[in-house]
Image (tube, rainbow, N blue to C red):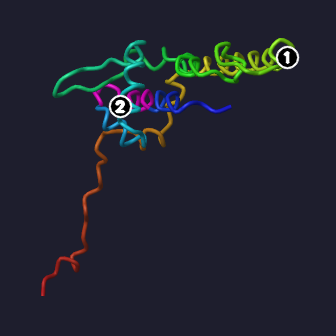
Amino acid sequence: MRLTMRTNLAMRTLMFCAVNQGRTVRKHEVAEQCNASENHLAQVINTLAQLGYVDTVRGRNGGLRLGRPPEQIRVGEVARVFETPVPFAECFDPETNTCPLIGNCRLQTALKAALEAFYTSLEKVTLADLIDGNDGLHLLLSMQPVRSAPCHRPASALHIQ
């Protein structure tokens, strides 16, 4: 099984917004930090906004931010939204199915059960579970400026001849 790029970008975007909560982030910042195309990201952000996962702000200081608390965003729900339009197997789409086994194959039933178990498992995970206490993720995605220690040069380094 493999998640679509849209699902992957949706989760990256939500994690980016969650790590930078309290700040309106810009699409280009998300794209840069998450190694994503701004064009693909625009489509994903539009869907996330339509479903209330993010709020978008237009204008000069516009951008996006979480539309719900991280504890209320379930990974499985997001995955279902972005994965459902893509049939898992040919036989899952009655309009394009050409499999000759369709009426007698039990694989489709097993695959449907496996997919449901997959989504049910992911629905137990919230966005908060992904970010809380995840210092490495915060370090990668935080837009807060990194405060460097003051530079202390030894006196000998400052000596001019």
Residue that extends furthest to the bottom in the rendered view of this protein: 161
Q: Is residue 27 above or below residue 56?
A: below
Q: Which residues are magenta?
A: 13-25
Q: Is residue 143 above or below residue 71?
A: below
Sequence-first tag of 2 and 1: 2
| Quadrant in which the C terminus is drawn | bottom left
Q: Which residue is mark 1?
A: 106
Is 21 in the magenta? yes
Residue 159 in percent (x, y) is at: 16, 81
* Amino acid on which the number 1 mark rests in the picture: Arg
Residue 34 location, quadrant: top left
On the picture, is 20 further left or further right than 158? right
Residue 6 in percent (x, y) is at: 49, 29
Disc 1 crowd, CA 10 A, few/some/many (<14, 14-19, 20+):
few
Residue 74 in percent (x, y) is at: 54, 18
Q: Which of the labelled discs sits on residue 20, or is there none?
A: 2
On the picture, is 90 further left or further right than 144? right
On the picture, is 80 further left or further right than 88? left
Of the two numbered discs 2 and 1 in the rendering, the one whose residue sits closer to the viewer: 1
Is 67 in the magenta? no
**SS label for mark 2:** loop
Residue at the spot x=22%, y=25% of the render? 62
Residue 111 location, quadrant: top right
Residue 76 in percent (x, y) is at: 59, 19
| Quadrant in which the N terminus is drawn | top right
**SS label for mark 1:** loop
Q: Which of the labelled discs sits on residue 30, or is there none?
A: none
Residue at the spot x=42%, y=12% of the render? 51
